[in-house]
């Protein structure tokens, strides 16, 4: 019997996320959505577009501007058997509701001796590059990954975004789902073409905690997440023209962290560059390097990290662009390895 090939169907991350949430809402009446401007507007970043029209105001709830209130309410609903998907519009706003996130969402299962689960998804936007200054442009991946009790995931393309959102909603644990604004496919934020990929219409899961090689190589491993993956892919194409074979590894998840995938890749290449739009110190980049060093992987050169400098994010475009990671900074990091 001839197998019919599925027609290519390219979606943005925003559309893929909305489709995943809609499919889960159709099959599980316990799933509902809460947040600011997620109703008729469909979310500032498009993640809930179309949901209000299909499911109405009871299951798609626009909230007042009180992150503490609606995230606290989501924790209560999840603890009572519901499956809320709640949007914290900008990750930078975590400061006003961190008690609800870390002292309730992340810890309640432990506090209850496992008798109360908190199956909720906290989706939130990350990233800069469009001059929205220090309160709307951070990534702070490591801030959430550092705190036990919740999973932390961050897709770099639409296929992963849909599958990971489905997996996150079905997971009995609280999941922080971080999406980078520049990868959403929203015109006013710019569009990363490599993030717009084929997405099957059927529901499927992408396992949380499994990294993936997005480009195989033999000379250097470039590890990244969200925007860092795309900086790495661009750098790899430039390096290829110089005769260098770069492997790009997309972590996809920080908690659980696929340390084995990182170790196996660096064993092959002997060189490591870690890319993250989060801050340089005490972050994901250092954790990945420590993972490789503690495993005793033989290295041909000292590992390098390309991350955001330890400064508040500037408003002025020239200063912000100077601070952001880039393919050029990755290539510069590789050139330092060649000098050793």
Image (spheres, rainbow, N blue to C red):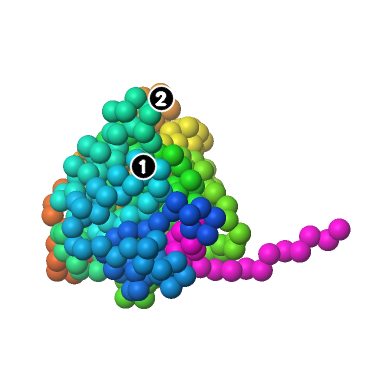
Residue 159 against residue 39 in the figure, above or below = above
Residue corresponding to mark 1 = 80
Q: Is residue 319 above or below residue 259?
A: below
Towards the viewer: 180 or 219: 180
Residue beneath disc 2 = 295
Residue 86 in sight: yes
Is 32 in front, or is 157?
32
Disc 1 vs disc 2: which is toward the camera? Answer: 1
Single out the residue that lies furthest toward the bottom: 187
Which of pointers 1 and 2 lies earlier in the amino acid sequence? Answer: 1
- Which quarter of the rendered picture does the C terminus lie within? top left
Disc number for residue 121: none
- Secondary structure at badge 2 equals loop
Q: Is residue 142 left or right of residue 66?
A: right
In magenta stretch: residue 127: no
Coordinates of residue 5 in the picture (x, y in percent): 72, 64
Instruction: Report x, y in % for residue 84.
Output: 37, 51
Q: Residue 65, how many percent across, how many down?
A: 19, 62
Residue 219, percent from left and from top: 48, 43
């Amino acid at each position: 019997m001839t197998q019919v090939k599925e027609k290519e169907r390219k979606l943005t991350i925003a559309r893929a996320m909305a489709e995943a949430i809609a499919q889960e809402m159709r099959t599980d009446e316990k799933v509902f959505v809460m947040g600011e401007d997620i109703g008729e507007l469909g979310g500032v970043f498009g993640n809930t577009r179309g949901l209000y029209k299909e499911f109405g105001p009871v299951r798609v709830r626009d909230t007042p501007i009180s992150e503490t209130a609606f995230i606290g309410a989501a924790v209560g609903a999840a603890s009572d058997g519901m499956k809320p998907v709640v949007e914290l519009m900008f990750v930078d706003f975590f400061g006003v509701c961190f008690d609800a996130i870390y002292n309730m969402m992340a810890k309640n299962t432990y506090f209850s001796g496992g008798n109360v689960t908190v199956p909720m998804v906290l989706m939130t936007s990350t990233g800069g590059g469009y001059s929205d200054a220090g309160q709307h442009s951070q990534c702070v991946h490591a801030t959430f990954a550092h705190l036990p009790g919740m999973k932390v995931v961050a897709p770099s393309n639409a296929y992963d975004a849909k599958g990971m959102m489905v997996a996150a909603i079905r997971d009995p644990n609280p999941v922080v789902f971080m999406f980078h604004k520049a990868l959403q496919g929203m015109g006013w934020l710019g569009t990363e073409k490599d993030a717009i990929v084929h997405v099957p219409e059927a529901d499927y899961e992408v396992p949380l905690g499994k990294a993936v090689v997005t480009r195989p190589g033999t000379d250097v491993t470039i590890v990244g997440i969200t925007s860092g993956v795309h900086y790495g892919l661009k750098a790899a194409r430039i390096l290829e023209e110089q005769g260098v074979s770069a492997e790009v590894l997309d972590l996809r998840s920080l908690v659980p962290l696929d340390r084995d995938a990182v170790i196996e890749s660096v064993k092959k290449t002997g060189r490591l560059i870690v890319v993250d739009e989060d801050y340089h110190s005490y972050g994901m980049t250092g954790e990945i390097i420590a993972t490789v060093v503690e495993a005793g992987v033989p290295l041909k050169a000292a590992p390098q990290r390309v991350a955001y400098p330890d400064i508040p994010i500037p408003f002025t475009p020239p200063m912000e662009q100077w601070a952001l990671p880039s393919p050029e900074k990755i290539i510069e990091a590789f050139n330092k390895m060649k000098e050793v």
